[in-house]
Image (tube, helix red, strand yellow):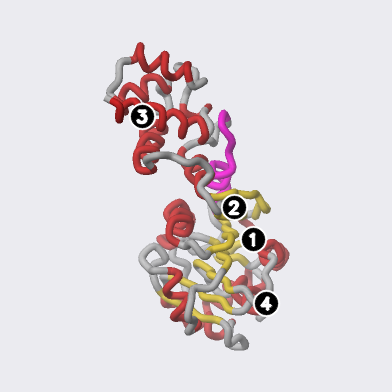
Amino acid sequence: MSGLASYSGIRDLMERYELLPRKKWGQNFLFDQNIIRKIVDSCELTPNEYVLEIGPGLGALTREFAQKSQGVMAVDIDRRLEGVLNEVLSDYDNFRILFADILKVDIEEEFKKAFCLNEIPAYQVCANIPYYITTPIIFRLLENCPHMQSATLMMQREVAARILASPGGKDYGLLSIMTAYYCEPEFLMKVSRNCFYPRPEVESTVIRIRPLREKRVGVKDELLFKNFLRLAFQRRRKTILNICSEFFSRDKHRLEKQLRQIGIAPLSRPETLSIEAFALLVDTLQEEEDDV
């Protein structure tokens, strides 16, 4: 459908279906065919693979996935898109659409139901995800989708920078560490705001995340580890010594000695520590607490 290949074509298609983009759902529809091809090619799909697409929009990417995969299940919250998606995907019998909130559905069970499968298939995720819920979507995929092989995600450039950041950088923070805990993130490409209708106020980046078979670090108490990380980056202007004193309710003089013993400078800031250093720190101080 040529209407998906240009700014004016997208606008005209939406007018024909009496659709207006919903800002509350972050609806900006990709139409640049060069970018679409690059995204699809980066997925390296094989004919026996399935695809989960979050936020199919008007179906520009969906149609390409349907051509190259065993089946596509698209999830969108906006039921108004049903007519245009059925038209755009009318030539493909391997396309399924589920109108639901992606944060509230059992994704893998829906896959089984959509394609009448006896077991959950291996699949890839592709999404031009709504920027206002980028982080919740990423962690829902990482924590609740064990059969996901990879996820190719377009997001606000600043969020991608935080995910890809290394210790010591200005973008490094809680999101950097928690994504590294679960997966291997990889930069794929930048996407100009001029590739969308309507044009968003921000630039975009496409990244790929590949879940790790085992989490990057082993910790004795995952909840404690995550809670400490949250506090650390809420207090990122404080030293790691002060943060540990607050979190573990410990004497600072004793803590300073313990931190030096495990190779962590007491006056360092949270954004300078690697995920491995945080894991060692929490496990060490927890061990002492258990011995008390």
Crowding at label 1, few (<14), some or many (≥20) Cα neighbours within 10 Å?
many
Residue 169 percent coordinates (x, y): 58, 31
In front of the other: label 2 or label 4? 4
Residue 118 percent coordinates (x, y): 47, 81
Query: Bounds of the magenta span?
Result: 155-168
Mark 1 or mark 4, earlier in chain: 4
> Residue visible at 48% across and 84% down?
116
Between 152 and 132, the one nearer to me in the picture: 152
In front of the other: label 1 or label 3? 3
Residue bearing the label numbered 3 = 287
Residue bearing the label numbered 4 = 47
Looking at the rendered structure, the secondary structure element under dot 1 is helix
* Label 2 – label 3 distance at C-alpha: 43 Å
> Residue visible at 30% across and 16% down?
251
Looking at the rendered structure, the secondary structure element under dot 4 is loop
Position of 16 relative to 172 (above/below): below
Residue bearing the label numbered 1 = 195
Between 69 and 201, the one nearer to me in the picture: 69
In front of the other: label 2 or label 3? 3
> Residue visible at 52% across and 77% down?
15
Position of 206 relative to 237 (above/below): below
